[in-house]
Image (spheres, grey):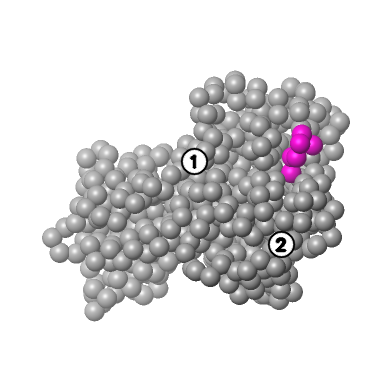
Amino acid sequence: MSNEPQRIVIAGGGITGLSAAFYAKRLFESKGQPVEITLVEKSDHLGGKIRTLHRDGFIIEQGPDSFLARKMPIIHLIRELGLEDQLTATNPNAKTNYILHKGKLHEMPLGLVLGIPTAVTPFMRTGLISPLGKLRAAMDLVLPRRSDDEDEALGTFIKRRLGQEVLDHITEPLLAGIYAGDTQSLSLKATFPQFRQIERKHRSLILGMLAAKKHAPKADGLPELARKSLFLTFRRGLVTLVDSLTQSLQGVRIITGQGIEHLSSEEGPGYKLILTDGKELQADGLVLALPAYETAKLLTDVPEAAWLDQITYASVANIALAYKQEDIEGFRMNGSGFVVPRKEGRLITACTWSSSKWLHTAPPGRSLLRTYVGRSDSQEWLRLSDKQLISGVRVDLAATMGITAEPEFVEITRCYRSMPQYPVGHREMLAKLHEQLKERKPGLWLCGAGYEGVGIPDCIQQGKSAAENLLSYIQAGSS
């Protein structure tokens, strides 16, 4: 093994890039391989979409507010950082979710997974689906499985198995909170491949989900909180994870406020990167933890990389409103919030009752709401001023929750091009690109929300995998 320090550059300081830097540092150190790691971030802050605002005793997430508790990549990272004692779970008394339907909030039936019933009685009793719609959904029990293995749109799949009503009234509004996406454009294989696997194995989605429920894997290795709560966060907000990762990168050179303008291959192994200010970086190994459209600009000499521009990113906004509790006492917030189907014609796509869902987010006597605006095929909101956004949100809150009081304050976060939309055929195209990169750009890896999962745990896993690939590549070149 070479005693010369290997130069590793990680482009992108979001959660994926930070995870790649963290694991690269640990892995190289554990193997005694000298390494110089440089992390480059275009903006002036690290953490990407994860941003937490502390204001007047409120804890306001300006990006995601939590993570799936049962995904082990983030649990492992939290343990390695020593943060497990800072975790907190959702309010056990606020488990009810709602869907707006014909102007009224309806409880989401228990046992629904994106509209797929895993408990028959609650589904049959819900007012979200008409009797004919329920009959159509029940046809899933007898419909044949699809014979080929071609990818299809998630919306096409749900409609094919469960019908249009389930898609419009349940699946689509629930997905808006994950992808802000159009179900008719999102790839099934890239978003919920397990549904296709269930159809192949059990034919019926409903029967397959019931079988999976009976044989659910044991929650081995999970923190106690994760056994009780589907989602977790930190008492001081998700920024806790970003801050701890950043502090762990002692010895890593961190450059913020500089993007990568140009990337070229060196003679022999390695890369030369030109930063916004004209300075150069040399890299023996390179991780591009960037949005797909930014990566496409750097890989113009890789034919398959042109496809990256087809991965569109939706712009969304979240608008947090703080109230005195007495000002909204007319509405009982006994759950975690509600989602809004596009058929309802509202500006907002969802509203999280943050201070009900997360008891740590508001001081005594206060309430916090977080509303969301923007879908992939509905970007008109981008033309609205802050004043117009607030006005539109308040109109919707008055109509849905009866809240007419003036909020104590409002915080608007505009997240431009922040939600990647995986097109049909995404996984197949990504596999082709990876193969071409092995041949044309050895020692270069892509990772991030635009590729193999948008959730925080998915991004952490992608960063870790990139670090492992880097080490293997460097070791192979040194032997």
Circle 2: element type: helix
Residue at the limit of the structure toward the left, as seen here: 267
Residue tagged 2: 139
The quadrant of the rendering that contains the N terminus is: bottom left
Q: Amino acid at mark 2?
A: Met
The quadrant of the rendering that contains the C terminus is: bottom left
Question: Position of 165 compared to 402: left or right?
Answer: left
- In the rendered picture of this protein, how many numbered marks are placed on residues? 2
**21 shown above or below 58:** below
Residue 106 vs residue 327, the one in the foreground? 106
Q: Residue at x 46, y 43 (%)?
A: 313
Residue 141 shows up from this direction: yes
Q: Nearer the viewer, mark 1 or mark 2?
A: 2
Query: x%, y% of residue 478?
Result: 23, 75
Residue 72 shows up from this direction: no
**166 shown above or below 258:** below
**389 shown above or below 20:** above
- The 10 Å Cα crowd at callout 1, few under 14, some 14 to 19, many 20 or more, is many
Residue 460 belongs to the span the image colors magenta? no
Question: Position of 210 compared to 26: left or right?
Answer: right
**28 shown above or below 37:** below
Residue tagged 1: 314
Q: Amino acid at mark 1?
A: Ala
Q: Main secondary structure of the magenta part?
A: strand
Task: Please report the bounds of the magenta region as a residue range.
Answer: 99-104
Query: x%, y% of residue 98?
Result: 76, 45
The CA distance from mark 1 to mark 2 is: 34 Å
- The 10 Å Cα crowd at callout 2, few under 14, some 14 to 19, many 20 or more, is some
